[in-house]
Amino acid sequence: MSDLTKFPIETEALVVQSPGSDLVMTKIAIQDLRPDEVLVEIKYSGLCHTDLLLVEGHIPSLPYPAIAGHEGAGVIVALGGDPDSSVALSLGLTVGTSVLCSYFSCGSCRNCKAKLTSKCDSIIWGNLGGVRQSDSSTAATLANGSTATTPVSAHFFGQSSLSRLAVVNVRSIVKCDYPDQMGLYAPMGCGYQTGAGTVLNTLKPDPQDLVVILGTGSVGMAAMMACAALGVKHVIVVDRAQIKLDLAREIFEAVEGSGGTITLINDGPRRSNGEFVDRVKKATKGLGAKFVIDTTGSGEVIEDMMECVALGGTAVSVGFPPSGQMITIDAGAFFIGNKSWITVLEGDAYPPEFIPRMIDLHRQGKFPIEKLIKIYAVEDLKQARADEEAGKVITPVLNFSTTASSSQQSSKI
């Protein structure tokens, strides 16, 4: 590893040069650390749907080249600022602290002061801008021999964790009390937090409330486990992959003390518009559900979701739609049905408190994420993505503690 006391510091990261291009393990140079930043040696990073949006160019606010990744886990190896100015030190963060990385929030706006950090005034620019929120600078450049002048977006969600060394804002840091479980807990920074938080923090369903979950990725599975942990008596899960639906049943029944019933609906491939709605209504005796959660971000699925909501019920969007996605709903029917449609970012979670809560649930047997995760060497990114798309794994996690075979290894995410 480079001398971490002298900048610039050379390292490697999975860089996407332009929208739609491959992720390539590329040498970068970290130019500096600010007083509100730490340098983290990334051990593991989860892969999330939002990373795919970045790679494909669906986040127009973010300049390229860029480093994705926002479910990092690792160890602090350097602090920004001197002992008098380091924000990390004031928060009890030191070199050697094991950490999980979550989303960025400014810490100073009204919502942040109330711990409503997912509603931070800077939530969009601070997480999706790819640069420092304070001055639009970036800590990283491409390392081209003796020159390093091409800036790289390296502050995605305050972390850009698909890198062996990542500059992380202290507002994105949560201490990890179980360093031997970093690989397991890395996805709590976004995917699991989004799904579980939507149920536990926002909806708070009663046991008799019917909940429908659309999609069985990391977010959907986390929402389902949270329902089971709350003792919700009936959960309906919809997906197009039977292998994932079968796993959903296994996990739901494995949650300690759940005792509820799960109904599985295989929706794929669709043959006509409305079929999905009919099947959910049949499963709910024509009434629809109190809560319907869409984790896919698909415009077609969102439109169908509205038809599945019971009178007085709530449609919930937690999946990130591509920029410019438009939908059509029957406004009159929606109005007369007294329905609500809300969006939830990051599970309305305050990460320093909610991530430890999820860890506690896991250790109590109520959040069996070990059934969802498979850890891959970073060089096996292509295989990790293929396994996820085939439904063989729900949550792929990359292990960065391996040695890259080539500094220009290409992997399509």
Image (spheres, rainbow, N blue to C red):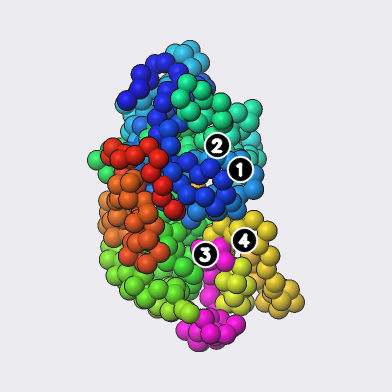
What's under tag 4, amino acid-wise? Ile
**Is 168 drawn above or below residue 102 in the view shown?**
above
Residue occupying image coordinates x 52% and y 25%: 148
Mark 1, residue position: 62
Towards the viewer: 89 or 385: 385
- As drawn, which residue projects farthest toward the left? 180
Task: Give residue 169's position: percent from left, percent from top.
Answer: 50, 31
- The answer to whether residue 350 is seen in the rendering is no
Residue drawn at (51%, 63%) of the image: 295
Secondary structure of the residue carrying numbered label 3: loop
User: Magenta residues?
Assistant: 270-298
Residue 10: percent from left, percent from top: 41, 26
| Closer to us: 129 or 379 | 379
Q: Nearer the viewer, mark 1 or mark 4?
A: 1
Q: How far is the residue under mark 3 from the one under mark 1?
A: 22 Å
How far apart, in angstroms, are the residues tagged by discs 1 and 4?
Answer: 25 Å
Indicate left or right for 290 with 2 as reference.
Answer: right
Question: Which residue lies under the disc numbered 2?
Answer: 153
Which residue does the numbered mark 3 point to in the structure image? 296
